[in-house]
Amino acid sequence: MEPLVDLLSGRNVAVLSGAGLSTESGIPDYRGPQTRQRVRNPIQYRQFVDDPAWRARYWARATLGWPRIRDARPNDGHVALAALGWPVITQNVDRLHARAGTDAIELHGALAEVVCLTCGDVTDRDALQTELLRRNPHLHHLTAAAAPDGDADLVEAADVPSCRCGGILKPHVVFFGENVPRDRVERAYAHVDDAEALLVVGSSLTVFSGFRFVKRAASRGIPIAIVDLGPTRGDPLATLKVEVPTGEALPFLARRLRGAG
């Protein structure tokens, strides 16, 4: 990993993180080598908004998946990035960067919040969890594998509350088929434009919401380092690719760049 140290040493670095960073915290990703055949496709935005049956199934699964997200703790990779102090853009919705002490741009929002699609009121996810379990006591006794969006691999319906205004409640995250808010994209572009190197960690860069920042860095001649297991969409644009677990590579990088080894 010495080439990674050499590339980033003395540079102003922007970081783009993906789901692979959080696997060591017990949160699976959709496309990683250990989950490629196991985790199903996530719900689409129009399915959630247009179909009450899809919405009920989502919230039933999310009721089971939420505790894993809520109780997850930052791993050594998150802690190392916090110690390095670089600006972070994350595709993750688990809030683990914040828990580690990094004020990251959360491109896709955070599962810790719920938003009303009518009045825009934002509330705490745990409060909704309490109400979901009150209305659906049978869910107390079920278990399921959680997915990165806090959903779980279970076909089941739930009695789902509405907002006080009567509107639909949705996780305050960007679903597949939904656009990332423009202000977040612009703030993230500013981090990339100010950087002297871009470090991508734990992202396959399959979706454009993250890949756009690699393209931006490449267009500006900014060196790009990718730390991820397996191929990524950004490999042809990378200055350096390191196929090492993020929980190993990032602490090593922090020790070397902060003068501790």
Image (cartoon, rainbow, N blue to C red):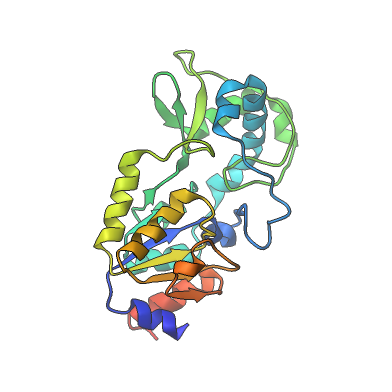
Q: Quadrant of residue 85?
A: bottom left
Instruction: Return the x and y of residue 243 as percentages of the image width and height.
Output: 56, 74
Q: From this view, report whether residue 144 is shown above or below residue 5.
A: above
Q: Is residue 111 among the parts visible in the rendering? A: yes
Check the image and report above or below for 245 versus 189. below
Q: Position of residue 254 (x, y in %)?
A: 39, 75
What is the total number of numbered labels drawn onto the structure image?
Answer: 0
Compared to residue 176, the image places residue 221 above or below, namely: below
Q: Nearer the viewer, residue 44 or 248?
A: 44
Q: Position of residue 44 (x, y in %)?
A: 58, 35
Q: Is residue 52 left or right of residue 125?
A: right
Q: Where residue 184 sits: x, y (%)?
A: 34, 44
Q: Which of the two residues, 214 or 256, is positioned nearer the viewer here?
A: 214
Q: Residue at left 51%, top 29%?
A: 170
At 62% from the left and 22% from the top, the residue drawn is 51
Q: Say which quarter of the image contains residue 141.
A: top right
Q: What residue occupies the far top of the structure in this picture? A: 166
Q: Is residue 151 above or below residue 39?
A: above
* Position of the C terminus by quadrant: bottom left
